[in-house]
Image (tube, helix red, strand yellow):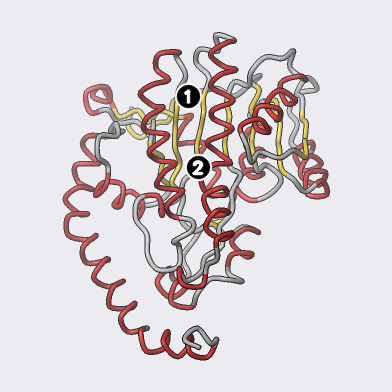
Amino acid sequence: MFGLFSQKWNPDGKHVYITGGSSGLGLALAHILAQKGAHISIVARNQTKLDEAIESIEKLRVSPSQIFKAYSLPLDSGSAAAKALETVSDAHGGEAPDAIFTCAGASTPKFFIDMDEKDMVDGMMNAYWLQAWTAWAATKQMVRGGKRGAKIVFVSSTLGYMTFVGYASYSPGKHALRGLADTLNSELKLYGIDVHIYFPGTMFTPGYTEETKTKPEITQTIEGTDGVTAEQAALALYKGMALHYVVGLYSRILGVVNGNYHISGDLITDLFCASTRGAAPRNNWLLEGLYDLVAYIAVPVWRSSVEKQVLAHREEHQTYLAKKGFYS
């Protein structure tokens, strides 16, 4: 029995709440879970996109009993997140969702020197607070309802393990999100609530298209052109938190679990995880030991390459600042 996936979490009949579910990763995840028999609630702000999203989810219904709902609600404060969760739960007898995926967020890459106060505040809101407030409200509701076995799944980024030029308003929130998830992974064991955090790389989504409008050229050069679709990223997330990877009789000894807590969808992110893991639980002692060795060499080489590209851009950047009148 080598290389077999066995079900670790079955979404069939479960109520799943997805923030940012009208497009991108959130919508792709909703499609997967709808086909697995889950009840789906999505929350976003744009009603037109929500209507289109719920129509696409309906096409994937596998049971007449499934409940699909879409809500245009804010999530940018503790009270707003709590109100949204209460609204979502009303269609299910007031009971807390069985799983919450916090996919809401956005990135606006710029040079730090070009940012204003609003850019900095919005950066933390979009990268951290939109998810933190939902998790805060959900934890309270789940604990009061005795919702053991419930799941809270955060969405960070490869930029939650490392960062580089252009992401001064975004990466800090994604690093903070990891700190919150690491804390809750420990604390919520008190109540039998599972916590996961996903670190996707570049995803070709509507959000990605929007962020390229402000992204500095040097940032795009460092990132390159590699990436995945929202559907590929959603599948990696689902497999990471829902499926157990069985490897013979020694799976329990080796701890071979496909992303039980920190979830990655690509090798590059796995290597950054290995180099910055800290005290986070390991998913696979054997494989991650190998990643540790590779990352010990590969990550400093990557960092050196990035620094060379940034330094090579210095003269061009000075010209850019002068042309926009920064020194005037």
Between marks 1 and 2 in the image, the one whose residue lies nearer the viewer? 2
Outermost residue to the front: 328
Identify which residue is drawn at 63% across, 51% down: 24
**Residue 5 drawn above or below residue 234:** above
Q: Residue 7 carries which label?
A: 1
**Residue 117 drawn above or below residue 254:** below
Identify which residue is drawn at 44% across, 32% down: 196
Identify the image quadrant of residue 179.
top left
List x then y, in percent, for residue 14: 63, 20
| 1 or 2: tag closer to the N-terminus | 1
Question: Depth check: 180 or 36 in front?
Answer: 180
Identify which residue is drawn at 71% across, 45% down: 22
Residue assigned mark 2: 155
For marks 1 and 2, give the CA distance. Answer: 22 Å
List x then y, in percent, for residue 45: 74, 45
Q: How many marks?
A: 2
- Say what secondary structure mark 2 lies in: strand
List x then y, in percent, for residue 212: 58, 69
Question: Depth check: 112 or 282 in front?
Answer: 112
List x then y, in percent, for residue 318: 41, 87
